[in-house]
Image (cartoon, grey):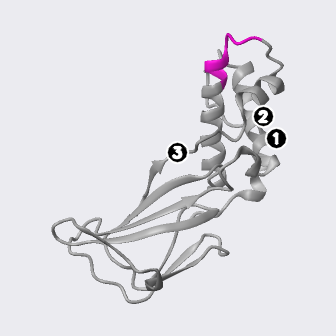
């Protein structure tokens, strides 16, 4: 069971203009570098917190229904479960009816409970769950403290971009801002 990114975020949690203002950069010469650092820092914040910042579409593949008839989705916050499909032996997908499952998005991690479910016709990746996760579609939907953590990480990388000796861990200030949002690993 592993999540697969289907559709990335439409925007980054911090715009190029906001990041340049934070870095006090006035020209456009390093726009590509700064935009790349923002994307990389978003991935660091998402990995450290185990939360998706801006709305993204993900797919979770299962081999079989869990004996508990429930599954914890590995990413949060959950926006919606868009569809659940079961594949037959020919690889043809049949969507589950809306009354065949319930979603508990208030749990952390979010839970999907299954009622009557058809068995998949293939032994590997016979079930697909498509869902959207993130705080919302806009940068402003992301908590301000997580956006600030991202800015601090980008600033450190921008100021020390020639220093590659040793491991480049996020600064303690950024980790302290991320800590309240961290989810335990399952």
Q: Position of residue 110 (x, y in %)?
A: 59, 71
Q: Quadrant of the C terminus?
A: bottom right
Q: Is residue 162 left or right of residue 121?
A: right
Q: Which is more foreground, mark 3 or mark 2?
A: 3
In magenta, the rendered stretch is: 27-34
Query: Looking at the picture, does residue 71 appear above or below residue 5?
Result: below
Q: Quadrant of the N terminus?
A: bottom left
The disc placed on residue 8 is: 3
The stretch drawn in magenta includes residue 136: no
Which residue is painted at 61% across and 34% down in the image? Answer: 39
First in sequence: mark 3 or mark 2? 3
Q: Secondary structure at mark 1?
A: helix
Q: What is the distance, in whole Å, between disc 1 and disc 2 at their CAs? A: 8 Å
For residue 122, what is the image quadrant?
A: bottom left
Which residue is painted at 46% across and 80% down in the image? Answer: 98
- Between 65 and 178, the one lying in front of the other is 65
CB atoms of marks 1 and 2 within 8 Å: yes
For residue 22, what is the image quadrant?
A: top right
Q: Which is more foreground, mark 1 or mark 2?
A: 2
Residue where numbered disc 1 is placed = 173
Q: Position of residue 120 (x, y in %)?
A: 26, 76
Residue where numbered disc 2 is placed = 152
First in sequence: mark 1 or mark 2? 2
Q: What is the distance, in whole Å, between disc 3 and disc 1 at their CAs? A: 27 Å
Q: Secondary structure at mark 2?
A: helix
Q: Which is more foreground, mark 3 or mark 1?
A: 3
- Between 172 and 83, the one lying in front of the other is 83
User: Label 1 neighbourhood size at 10 Å, few (<14), some (14-19), many (20+)?
Assistant: few
User: Label 3 neighbourhood size at 10 Å, few (<14), some (14-19), many (20+)?
Assistant: few
CB atoms of marks 3 and 1 within 8 Å: no
Q: Position of residue 147 (x, y in %)?
A: 76, 43
Q: How many marks?
A: 3
């Amino acid at each position: 069971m592993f999540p697969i990114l289907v559709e990335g975020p439409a925007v980054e949690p911090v715009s190029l203009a906001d990041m340049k203002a934070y870095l006090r950069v006035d020209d456009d010469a390093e726009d590509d570098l700064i935009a790349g650092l923002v994307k990389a820092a978003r991935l660091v914040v998402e990995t450290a917190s185990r939360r998706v910042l801006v709305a993204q579409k993900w797919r979770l593949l299962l081999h079989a229904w869990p004996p508990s008839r429930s599954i914890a989705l590995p990413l949060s916050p959950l926006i919606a479960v868009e569809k659940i499909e079961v594949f037959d032996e020919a690889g043809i997908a049949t969507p589950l009816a809306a009354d065949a499952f319930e979603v508990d998005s208030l749990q952390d991690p979010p839970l999907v409970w299954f009622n009557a479910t058809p068995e998949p016709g293939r032994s590997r990746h016979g079930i697909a769950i498509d869902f959207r996760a993130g705080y919302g579609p806009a940068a402003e939907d992301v908590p301000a403290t997580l956006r600030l953590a991202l800015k601090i990480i980008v600033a450190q990388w921008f100021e020390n971009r020639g220093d590659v000796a040793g491991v480049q861990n996020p600064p303690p200030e950024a980790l302290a801002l991320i800590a309240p949002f961290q989810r335990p690993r399952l």
